[in-house]
Amino acid sequence: MTSTGLAATAPAIDHPQQWPVYDGQAVARATDLIRAGRTFDYRHGPEIAEIEQLFADHLDGRHVLAVNSGTSALLAAYYVLGLGPGDEVLVPSLTFLATASPLFVLGATPVLCDSGSANGNVTVASLAERITSRTRAIAVTHLFGHPCPMAEIAQLARERSLALIEDCSHAHGSTIDGVPVGTFGDLAVFSIGGLKLVSGGMGGVLACRDTRHYDLACLLSSFRQRSNLTVRDPALRRLADVGLGGNLRISPVAAVLASSHMRRLDALVRAKHDNATALVAALCTHPGIEGLGVAAGHTMGGWYDIVLRVDPLRAGFDRDDLVAALKRHGVRAGVPQTAPLHRTSVFTGARPPTWHAYSPATLRRRFTYAPEDLPVSARLHDEWISLPATYFNEPQEDLLGAYRRAAERALSDLAATR
Ligand SMILES: Cc1ncc(COP(=O)(O)O)c(C=O)c1O
């Protein structure tokens, strides 16, 4: 022990490869595509049809378009709703930037909303207070995999004639009363890229109720062959020769990799649940450290992040102390990367060089959020720690054991220094 009572050296913890991890069959399918020169698909080949069908089956038969990222899927969602200059869209402050930023391209205005519940999600109350006569849509994010209260939010959207978009990028497999998120709104978006539970490396999925939304998204994403094949409305299909200005196509290689995760979504969700609840329990032995809880009737799917709250008054140390103590014992703890947007550049007054789609009047109106404007999301984020969820998508007995022992040591170090 050092003079501060802390262990001088902690044993290193061996970490497995970080997600995304692919099984032999997925690697073989991807390799076959590469060997055959089939790394792109302008038509609607079996690999793209497969990932779309897997999502359609999961989402009660919604029309599904696979694209090259979650950000592109969000852009397509806002585009097909016809959003543009003067239109406001309610967006949580606590979300990844891409829930809001595609609106800049269209010239529509994201209006940031505060968290209304301890898990960081927006609620009817925190959304309703930001509705104006210009509000056209509500976008919600099921943060870290926690479903938002969708029955109430869908009712608000209906009452106020607003479109409803679910960003499910953290929440593959999350449910409310057995019904998967992504089926409550008019449109749903899933990132299937990066560290997500279902990941093809890069990719995204748009799911819609309305065939017109699907047709427009198809035309935006895939001019010519694919649109000729899959746009339903003959009048819109006539536009396939030019499309609507985008190329958002997914690679078939990404599609087969993502399909391999989607096919075993239930097993991944089970493993993640077991691992995450064990990790949360290992730290919640100390007063003032608590998990975010899961509402009655809700289940967590993606567990995109494993987040705990530290109440400094009850714990006797703060979030940063706990992160540092865990790191000293080899735990890859940190602060959740998903942080309040109202503390980021564009929303606090920085202006991009040109915003072509913005009218001069809108351009003069900078976003000037202050931290205290959305106090709940700011406070929550300042008290949260995050454990590296992406190592825990499959059974991990050894790593779990090592993390439990490290958590015990970290907490006893902190107790010794109080
Ligand atoms: C909530 C949320 N929405 C959208 C995205 C964007 O997805 P992508 O990285 O596939 O563009 C992400 C990515 O992390 C996300 O976390």
Image (tube, grey):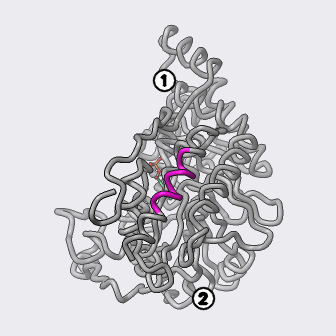
Pick out the residue farthest to the top: 35
Sequence-wise, the earlier of marks 2 and 1 is 1
Dot in front, 2 or 1: 2
Task: Bin the neighbour count of mark 1 within 10 Å (Cα to Cα): few under 14, some 14-19, many 20 and up.
Answer: some
In which quadrant of the rendered view does residue 45 lie?
A: top right
Task: Bin the neighbour count of mark 2 within 10 Å (Cα to Cα): few under 14, some 14-19, many 20 and up.
Answer: some
Q: Is-magenta flag for residue 403?
A: yes
- The image quadrant where one finds the N terminus is bottom left
Q: Residue 213: in sight, yes or no?
A: no
Q: In this picture, is 94 found above or below 96?
A: below
Most common secondary structure along the magenta stretch: helix
- Expressed as whole percent of the image width and height from the top left, the position of residue 188 reads 62, 57
Q: What is the three-letter code of the residue carrying label 1?
A: Phe
Indicate if the residue with disc 2 has its beta carbon within 8 Å of ligand 1. no
Indicate if the residue with disc 1 has its beta carbon within 8 Å of ligand 1. no
Magenta segment, which residues?
Answer: 402-410
Q: Is-magenta flag for residue 221?
A: no
Q: In this picture, is 392 found above or below 414?
A: above
Q: What is the three-letter code of the residue carrying label 2?
A: Ala
Residue displayed at 21% across by 80% down: 364
* Element at label 2: helix
Query: Who is closer to the viewer here, 55 or 381?
Result: 381
Query: Who is closer to the viewer here, 417 or 70?
Result: 417
Q: Which residue is mark 2?
A: 125
Residue displayed at 46% across by 42% down: 194
Q: Is residue 87 left or right of residue 281?
A: left
Q: Which residue is mark 1?
A: 40
* Element at label 1: loop
Q: In this picture, is 8 found above or below 67?
A: below
